[in-house]
Image (cartoon, grey):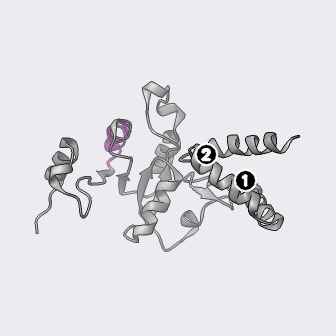
């Protein structure tokens, strides 16, 4: 295989990664070409290892290396609350805040009729099973504040409320340091609705 063909295959594969455009793919490819073989091998080994060792938690569908993820195994977590998120990366984002010590449930996406994703394609059945068998008192819905996230949140609230479990939604509104004049109407409206007493 020619050097040009090998480079093009690498560029094509890098370009498939989310957030990597042609220029970024080119920068990464040239970096790898200039790196020594050991550095490239470490990267390749890390990718293969993560694919072989990391899977979904059998309980919450977060990333795990054991049957259950570290959060589900942590006995110090508040086991009366479940925060429902769309993807495992959302767990990481919430954990970084240090403000939540409950459990999680990862849906594996959001309801999106346009993409032919309905409730049956998500881990909603497993969530309802957990709510029926665990002592959960509150479900915090933390889907993104977009049409699909709102649709998913409304659907979940409608099916969970009859179970006599409190259902809450993350507040949404203005970012810290944001200017009112640049906020869209929906964001500004949400900020007004989710205002709190000082």
Number of marks: 2
Determine if residue 115 is in view. Answer: yes
Label 2 crowd (10 A; few <14 / some 14-19 / many >=20)? few
Nearest the viewer among 99 and 155 is: 99
Q: Quadrant of residue 83?
A: bottom left
Up-down relation of residue 79 to residue 131 (above or below): below
| Quarter of the image where the C terminus is located | bottom left
Residue at the spot x=59%, y=66% of the render? 70
Indicate the position of residue 124 as horizontal and vertical percent values: 48, 40
Q: Is residue 188 left or right of residue 121?
A: left
Nearest the viewer among 3 and 44 is: 3
Q: Is residue 160 left or right of residue 40?
A: left
Q: Quadrant of residue 174?
A: bottom left
Q: Which residues are magenta?
A: 151-164
Determine if residue 101 is in view. Answer: no
Nearest the viewer among 38 and 185 is: 38
Q: Given the current orientation, which residue lies at the most extreme bottom position?
A: 76
| Secondary structure mainly formed by the magenta segment | helix
Indicate the position of residue 60 as horizontal and vertical percent values: 54, 53
| Quarter of the image where the N terminus is located | top right
Q: Given the current orientation, which residue lies at the most extreme right position?
A: 1
- Disc number placed over residue 8 in the picture, else none: none
Question: Helix or strand or loop: what does disc 2 sit on?
Answer: loop
For marks 2 and 1 on the same chain, the one whose residue lies earlier in the sequence: 2
The residue labelled by disc 2 is 17
Indicate the position of residue 144 as horizontal and vertical percent values: 37, 46
Q: Given the current orientation, which residue lies at the most extreme left position?
A: 197
Residue at the spot x=18%, y=52% of the render? 191
Residue at the spot x=18%, y=42% of the render? 185
Residue at the spot x=18%, y=54% of the render? 194
The residue labelled by disc 1 is 51
């Amino acid at each position: 295989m020619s050097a040009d063909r090998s480079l093009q295959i690498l560029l094509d594969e890098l370009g498939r990664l989310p957030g990597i455009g042609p220029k970024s793919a080119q920068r990464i490819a040239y970096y790898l070409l200039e790196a020594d073989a050991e550095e490239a091998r470490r990267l390749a080994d890390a990718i293969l290892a993560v694919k072989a060792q990391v899977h979904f938690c059998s309980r919450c569908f977060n990333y795990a290396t054991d049957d259950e993820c570290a959060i589900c195994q942590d006995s110090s977590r508040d086991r009366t609350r479940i925060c429902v998120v769309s993807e495992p990366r959302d767990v990481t984002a919430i954990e970084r805040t240090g403000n939540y010590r409950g459990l999680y449930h990862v849906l594996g996406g959001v309801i999106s009729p346009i993409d032919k994703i309905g409730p049956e394609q998500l881990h909603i059945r497993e969530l309802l099973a957990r709510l029926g068998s665990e002592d959960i008192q509150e479900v915090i819905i933390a889907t993104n504040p977009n049409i699909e996230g709102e649709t998913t949140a409304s659907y979940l609230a409608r099916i969970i409320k009859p179970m006599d479990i409190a259902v809450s939604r993350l507040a949404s509104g203005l970012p810290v340091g944001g200017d009112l004049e640049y906020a869209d109407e929906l964001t500004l409206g949400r900020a007004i609705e989710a205002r709190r007493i000082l």
